[in-house]
């Protein structure tokens, strides 16, 4: 019931105004209504004279709190806008753009691609100005007799433009739109089938079953098993050496892919002889096992392990496993533990690194498709395997997906705003992509809050994927680029080998090392480190302005869903174009 401010009206309605309780918890607040039966007529919240003033003060507080919340939101939006403006100013001042070519990089295709996008942007801004002027005159959406009867150069030019887009631009654009919609539906069916397959696997509780220890996969060679180095440090372990060495030599792992180092630091000659004899016995049985004995026990067990790591063959092994002399592993120990360590890859640290990674991943399959297509056709594999490889993998998921994603949402949709005679249904723009995305994340419900950013970012990445697909398919300049993703940590095999070789060289220096050389090595020049910079990505920035211009044009046609999609997609292109994601370098 609405609050009554006059005692007579309050008594006529059977009581006072609606009492409210305001609960303030910075920065939020809450309002709770109290029913009339819970308030005494004589209380200040009732219908008496005191209640009138109290109720008015409560309403005033509520309005002030609402104003405070609105001001806080405006302040936050202003701060975010200022931060974006400051970042953009830093990017422009730095002068770093994606046009800065790497050594040996061919930028001809990239320049032409950017030129096409820039032409579309200029035309869209001109058309927006024309459409706004025509809208203010009441001329929009269709050619009518009233427009033709208006005298003036601008009216005649606008009428000619409307006839031209109706007769010449709309038909081919509508045909291209329909073709992309068909490709979109085919790809949606593929995603739906994959999603239903995931549901079926989860519903039935199907899990991968490892092969039994006594069975071997005839199609899996030794290259499917990483190289493992097993170290067994010992020191006078006369009671347990035999059982421990026997257990380690019985590990279920391809013998060509693991090596055992028995690191003996025993000072008892008899024990050392027994351990060496046990090692030679297993060597005769074909096990790759080495016996090492140190006379000088520097560093004890740690020094023993470190000394063994200086061997030249250590760099050939990806994993190192250390067993104490009294530890006897089960035969399947390596098969149960090593898979958990298999290349937890490091995510790209910047948008530039991610773009180059995605370019490599989408250009490579197209090169394989171009080179291997006839070999696949002539091969003796079954028809359905050929169909799955050619149509589903290469064409649908690697060719059609980036093509229609870029063409439909970044080219056709903005153009239909300026040529409204070519229609793009709302269900293509909103409903089916949202439904497919929801179905895809249902197996992982924790990803639900990221569905909208994921859709926007995937459409943003379609520019890079489309460029990579075209260059790989037609063997253009950027197809020959092979830029490895930059990494900030020491996580690659090459870094590990370099580290081992570096330590090996330092360990093998003579007793009178060159101190000057070591000093220079330990104090490298600071100028040799390459500085990092955020960049401005011109294609993404130009597309952001194109989409935002199309969003403004959609307001003239009262196309709500199209406006929101173009607005948010344009903002996402703007964020990416200014390199505001990933690592920020001040």
Image (spheres, grey):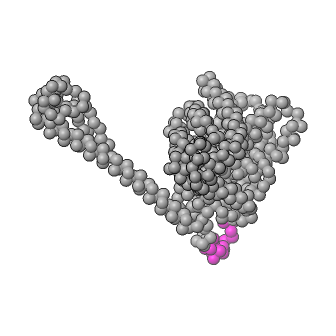
Residue 526's x, y, as percent? 58, 71
Q: Does residue 516 appear anywhere in the picture?
A: yes
Q: Position of residue 190 (x, y in %)?
A: 69, 32
Instruction: Give the total of numbered labels.
Output: 0
Q: Is residue 517 magenta?
A: yes
Residue drawn at 19 percent across, 41 percent down: 57
Above or below 192: residue 98: below
Numbered range of the magenta stretch: 506-521
- Residue drawn at (55%, 65%) of the image: 92
Q: Which residue is at 19% across, 39% downward? A: 56
Q: Position of residue 136 (x, y in %)?
A: 50, 50
Residue 558 is left or right of residue 24, and the answer is: right
Q: Quadrant of residue 61?
A: top left
Would you place residue 564 above or below residue 133 in this image?
Answer: above
Q: Quadrant of the N terminus?
A: top left
Is 479 included in the stretch rendered in magenta?
A: no
> Which residue is found at the position 84% from the left and 43% from the top?
372
527 or 473: nearer the viewer: 473
């Amino acid at each position: 019931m609405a609050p009554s401010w006059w005692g007579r009206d309050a008594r006529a309605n059977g009581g006072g105004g609606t009492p409210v309780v305001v609960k303030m918890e910075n920065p939020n607040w809450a309002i709770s209504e109290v029913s009339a039966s819970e308030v005494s007529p004589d209380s200040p919240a009732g219908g008496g004279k005191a209640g009138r003033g109290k109720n008015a003060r409560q309403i005033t507080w509520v309005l002030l709190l609402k104003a405070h919340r609105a001001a806080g939101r405006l302040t936050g939006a202003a701060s975010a806008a200022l931060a974006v403006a400051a970042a953009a100013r830093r990017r422009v001042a730095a002068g770093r753009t994606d046009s800065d070519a790497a050594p040996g990089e061919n930028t001809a295709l990239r320049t032409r691609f950017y030129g096409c996008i820039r032409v579309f942007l200029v035309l869209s801004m001109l058309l927006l100005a024309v459409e706004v002027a025509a809208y203010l005159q009441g001329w929009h959406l269709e050619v009518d007799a009233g427009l033709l009867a208006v005298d003036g150069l601008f009216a005649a030019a606008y009428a000619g433009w409307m006839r031209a887009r109706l007769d010449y631009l709309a038909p081919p654009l509508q045909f291209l739109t329909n073709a992309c919609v068909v490709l979109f539906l085919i790809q949606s069916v593929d995603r739906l089938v994959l999603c239903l397959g995931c549901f079926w696997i989860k519903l039935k509780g199907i899990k991968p079953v490892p092969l039994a220890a006594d069975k071997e996969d005839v199609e899996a060679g030794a290259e499917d098993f990483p190289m493992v180095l097993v170290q067994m440090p010992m020191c006078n372990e006369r009671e347990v050496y035999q059982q421990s060495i026997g257990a380690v030599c019985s590990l279920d792992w391809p013998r060509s892919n693991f090596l055992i180092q028995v690191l003996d630091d025993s000072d008892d000659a008899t024990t050392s002889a027994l351990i060496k004899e046990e090692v030679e016995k297993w060597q005769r049985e074909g096990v790759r096992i080495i016996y090492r004995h140190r006379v000088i026990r520097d560093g004890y067990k740690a020094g023993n392990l470190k000394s063994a790591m200086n061997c030249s063959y250590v760099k050939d092994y990806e994993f190192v496993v250390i067993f104490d002399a009294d530890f006897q592993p089960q035969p399947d120990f390596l098969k149960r533990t090593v898979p958990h360590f298999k290349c937890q890859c490091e995510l790209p640290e910047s948008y530039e690194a991610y773009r180059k990674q995605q370019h490599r991943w989408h250009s490579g399959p197209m090169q394989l498709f171009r080179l291997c297509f006839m070999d696949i056709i002539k091969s003796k594999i079954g028809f359905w395997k050929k169909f799955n490889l050619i149509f589903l993998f290469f064409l649908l998921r690697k060719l059609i997906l980036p093509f229609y994603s870029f063409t439909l949402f970044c080219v056709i949709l903005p153009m239909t705003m300026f040529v409204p005679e070519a229609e793009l249904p709302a269900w293509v723009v909103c409903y089916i992509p949202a439904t497919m995305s929801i179905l895809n994340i249902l197996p992982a419900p924790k990803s639900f809050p990221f569905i909208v950013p994921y859709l926007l970012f995937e459409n943003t990445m379609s520019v890079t994927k489309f460029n990579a697909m075209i260059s790989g398919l037609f063997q253009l300049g950027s197809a020959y680029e092979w830029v490895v993703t930059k990494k900030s940590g020491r996580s690659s095999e090459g870094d590990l080998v370099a580290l081992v070789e570096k330590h090996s060289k330092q360990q093998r220096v003579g007793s009178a090392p060159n101190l000057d050389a070591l000093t220079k090595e330990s104090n490298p020049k600071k100028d040799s480190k390459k500085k990092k910079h955020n960049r401005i990505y011109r294609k993404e920035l130009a597309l952001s302005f194109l989409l935002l211009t199309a969003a403004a044009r959609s307001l003239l046609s009262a196309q709500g869903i199209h406006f929101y999609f173009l607005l948010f997609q344009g903002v996402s292109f703007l964020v990416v174009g200014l390199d505001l994601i990933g690592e920020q370098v001040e």
